[in-house]
Image (spheres, helix red, strand yellow):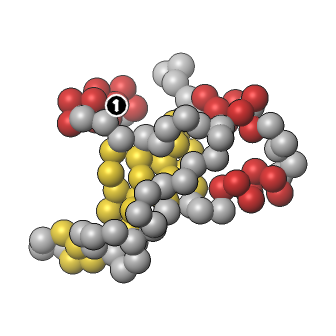
Amino acid sequence: TGRYPGLYSGHALKEALAAAGIKRPEQTELAKCWLWIAQYGPAPLIPRVWDRWTLWQYTDGAAGPQPHSVDGIGRCDRDQFNGTADELRVFWKASA
């Protein structure tokens, strides 16, 4: 497709990059990937590799900001897209 994939990671991403010996991750191919970050605080903290997150998993259904559940499903992982509904449609279509 000519597109870089997304990178999904949790709060330990910075430590994982350091453990892999990646000293300047902003100068690697990783910087070309969109970021899906899982952090259950009030706002995601992202490594300097990225200037923004694309998707933020803000809860696992127990920890993190509300809401934690979906009607008819119950508690579950919940995510937020960093953009408008129209931008999300374009993003999903291009990423499919």
Count of residue discs: 1
Please identify the residue farthest to the front as the structure is shown: 42
Horizontal side of residue 84 vs 14, given as left or right: left
Q: Is residue 51 visible?
A: yes
Q: Residues within 10 Å of mark 1 (few under 14, many from 20)?
A: some
Hey, which quadrant is residue 73 in on the image?
bottom left
Q: Residue at x 84, y 42 (%)?
A: 23
Q: Residue at x 34, y 69 (%)?
A: 65
Q: Residue at x 64, y 47 (%)?
A: 47
58 above or below 64?
Answer: above
Horizontal side of residue 64 vs 53, given as left or right: left
Please identify the residue farthest to the right as the structure is shown: 21
Q: Nearer the viewer, residue 12 or 44?
A: 44
Amino acid on which disc 1 is placed: Phe
SS for dot 1: helix
Q: Return the x and y of residue 75 as percentages of the image width and height.
A: 27, 77
Q: Is residue 89 visible?
A: no
Q: Which quarter of the image is occupied by the C terminus?
A: top left
Q: Nearer the viewer, residue 66 or 87?
A: 66
Q: Return the x and y of residue 2 as percentages of the image width and height.
A: 53, 19
Horizontal side of residue 68 vs 40, given as left or right: left
Please identify the residue farthest to the top as the structure is shown: 2
Q: Nearer the viewer, residue 15 or 5?
A: 15
Q: Residue at x 36, y 26 (%)?
A: 94
Q: Mark 1 highlights which residue?
A: 91
Q: Return the x and y of residue 52 as percentages of the image width and height.
A: 49, 38
Horizontal side of residue 42 vs 87, given as left or right: right
